Amino acid sequence: DEALKAAVEMSERYITARCLPDKAIDVIDESGARIRLKTMTRPPNLKEIDEQVDQLNDEKEEAVANQDFEKAASLRDKADKLRKKKETITQEWREKSKETLGTVDEEVIAEVVSKMTGIPLTRVSTEDGERLMQMEDELHERVISQDAAVTAISKAVRRSRSGLKDPRRPTGCFIFAGPTGVGKTLLAKALAEYMFGDSDALIHIDMSEYMEKHNVSRLIGAPPGYVGFEEGGQLTEKIRRRPYAVVLLDEIEKAHPDVFNMLLQVMEEGRLTDSFGRNVDFRNVILILTTNAGAEAIKNESSFGFQAPDNDASYEAMKKRVMEQIERVFRPEFLNRLDDTIIFRHLDVSDLKEIVDLELAKVRERLSDLEMVLELTDDAREFIVNAGSNTNYGARPLRRAIESLIEDPLSEELLKGEFTGKNKILVDAKWDSDHERIERLDFKGEFCKKIAKDQEEVVATVATAVSEDSTEKELGEE
């Protein structure tokens, strides 16, 4: 009875494209089939035993052909032992299958609905619970600083996974504001990677494409009789196919006012009707809106940024100024439906140093494909931070500094063949004659035996893992 009740409730809540009772019956049917298949799966080592028996039979026939009857008898006995072992394993498996109760419970129903919709509904395990409690730490591995934003997002995900969120509203609706280049879009990508294991799972829509009124309908689909009606909406169709998602509407202030009218329904009721008349469920979506409203006011305020990075009064003044701009740009009924409006902080020098390390890690990863290792001295890292530090533009100047100071010279040296036969590149600072100012970065290549040995071990480990994975896949198919 509990399973039947769970099938009705979960299918009604999470499977929105179909109607009751059909969708509940399908869930129960698939759950029963899932339990049945689990009890019918053959033990994986039976295939291995069959292969050994076939090999022994071939060797026995070869021994008989060579008139080596003693060896043939020995091989026959080994094959008989393996056959008896196979019979024992098969008998144990059949008895165990009879003893296993094929009961469909709430957990199986939740597992099936989760497979059908992509929404994690199974009971949170101890490992998952610990990972959710440490969600802030994992997000901070990619997003430097911005504690308030990371904490708000983490709380929303924990509410959803614990089952305490409002079932009629999206998992979370946030607006990210503040200076440019401080990680607003990056946090959304990091969240998608945390939840789905892939930052490309983020549904990223640039709202500058919807500045005109005639473009607004593209979000939910063109009306009947218009070009593109069969394709569906760029937003609704993606959510219909993946109802558990992170949606990023970038630079929302650029969108036409009609877009905000549609979002009111999404943020309050968690649903939207597309051009085909289908209700699209947004109740398991994290909706993130980014805006540059107030960025100009921040740029003109000289007391912000690196001069007072730890000054809470400076941050509160910036927050007040940005909120005033946001209230001018967005209507009250729109702001009232948000879960939180998060103002990002400026990045200080220590944050920029961490960001440099993250960006350099990407360069190291690309060099690892060439079997090379990149190392930088502290002076070289400090030179990059100083070259890419800009109060008004956040972390993006650092990326450009790494391109011009590291990637461009390094690519030229690689094309010239300067590092042929070398596997380690050391980047150091080149000081002037008075040792007062760094003029440029110096690149030196060398061959390190330890690095070469480590690379060989990594290759061997990967080859072993691939071989084991293919073996497990073959056994699973059997």
Image (cartoon, rainbow, N blue to C red):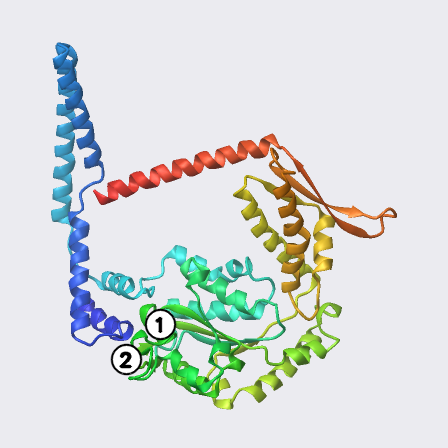
x, y percent for residue 1 = 16, 68
Residue 239's disc number: 1
357 and 424: which is toward the camera: 424
Q: Do we see residue 282 in this rendering?
A: no
257 and 307: which is toward the camera: 257
x, y percent for residue 471 = 30, 38
Q: Is residue 200 above or below residue 366?
A: below
Quick one: which residue is furthest to the right in this view? Answer: 434
Helix, strand or loop for disc 1: helix
Q: Is residue 134 above or below residue 175?
A: above
Q: Residue at x 70, y 66 (%)?
A: 390
Quadrant in which the C terminus appears: top left
Q: Is residue 341 above or below residue 193?
A: below
Residue type beneath disc 2? Arg
Q: Residue at x 29, y 64 (%)?
A: 114
Q: Residue at x 12, y 43 (%)?
A: 95
The quarter of the displayed image where residue 450 is located: top right
Badge 2 is on which residue?
A: 278
Residue type beneath disc 1? Ile
Q: Earlier in the sequence, mark 1 or mark 2?
A: 1
Helix, strand or loop for disc 2: loop
Q: Are the two marked residues, 1 and 2, in contact with CB atoms closer than 8 angstroms? A: no
Judge left or right: residue 54 versus residue 244.
left
x, y percent for residue 151 = 52, 68
How packed mark 1 is, by other alpha carbons closer than 10 Å (few <14, some 14-19, many 20 or more), is many
x, y percent for residue 42 = 17, 43
